[in-house]
Amino acid sequence: MKPVSPIFLPLIFLCLFSVACHTGRKVKASRLAMRNTFFKAAYNGMDGMDGSDGANRLAIVLFHMAKRGGNGKRGRNAANLQVKLSAMSSGDSVILALSITPQGGDGTDVYYVNPRHGKIAIFAEGGHGGNGGKGEDGEETTIKRPYGGQGGSGGRGGKGAAGATINVMVDSSALSYANCPCIVYFNGGGRGGSGGMGGRGTGNNPDGASGADGLPGISGPPVYIKSPGGKIIGIVSQK
């Protein structure tokens, strides 16, 4: 086999780096080779869809009234996570291995982190609520309708979803790294969607009312980090 030309080595490294820092799951490149970089392991719930603007809705209205904006959809909850932390020797250093399994998911992801130079952030946050749609403007004033019309109301913002449960089990080989700052957890609730603006009134009619903002989702429970025997050796709470 011919040796790799030195001119291609920077290109190969760049490709591996870009894959290792990918925010999605199921990265196929060698995470072990990129143990000194930052990983974002994201298992957040999906965001809710925004509501349609009144002018774009196929809604039935009476007496030529302006159509209201559609309501934003609720965000979706994140999947609960099971995290297993272990450690292995690599020359004169230690490499941490984190196995992450989402409940109801399609398998386990494994990340490798050098606790001295690398870092991983594990996310299981609720999805954000969708924004409410804008209300339709009132009907234009014409000779037949000289008084115009009131603007349609804005749609309500969708509610944010709840953060998930993250359970962490630490193998005996990694007990001294159970609370390593190289591993951080986020399981906050999703933001509520913004209420839609009311449509503009025409003639002497008022503008439509703005839609209410959606409520934020609640944070997930504290992250309990446990030893093989089930003893709690660390707790992480979202502010």
Image: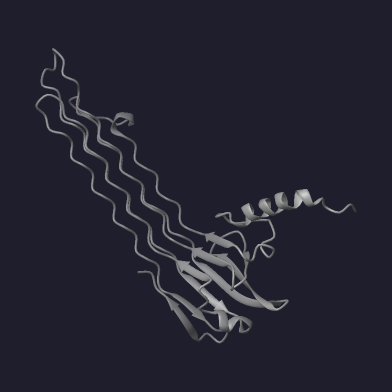
Question: x, y percentage for residue 178?
Answer: 54, 79
Residue appearing at x 61%, y 84% in the figure: 172
Question: x, y percentage for residue 186?
Answer: 44, 65
Q: Quadrant of the C terminus?
A: bottom left
Residue 196 as seen in the image, left or right of residue 223: left
Q: Residue furthest front?
A: 7
Question: x, y percentage for residue 123?
Answer: 48, 62
Residue 186 as seen in the image, left or right of residue 39: left
Q: Residue furthest right?
A: 1
Which one is in front, 86 or 18? 18
Q: Is residue 149 above or below residue 179?
A: above
Which one is in front, 102 or 17? 17
Q: Is residue 18 above or below residue 51?
A: below
Q: Residue furthest top?
A: 143
Image quarter of residue 101: bottom right
Q: Is residue 215 above or below residue 110?
A: above
Residue appearing at x 58%, y 54% in the figure: 22
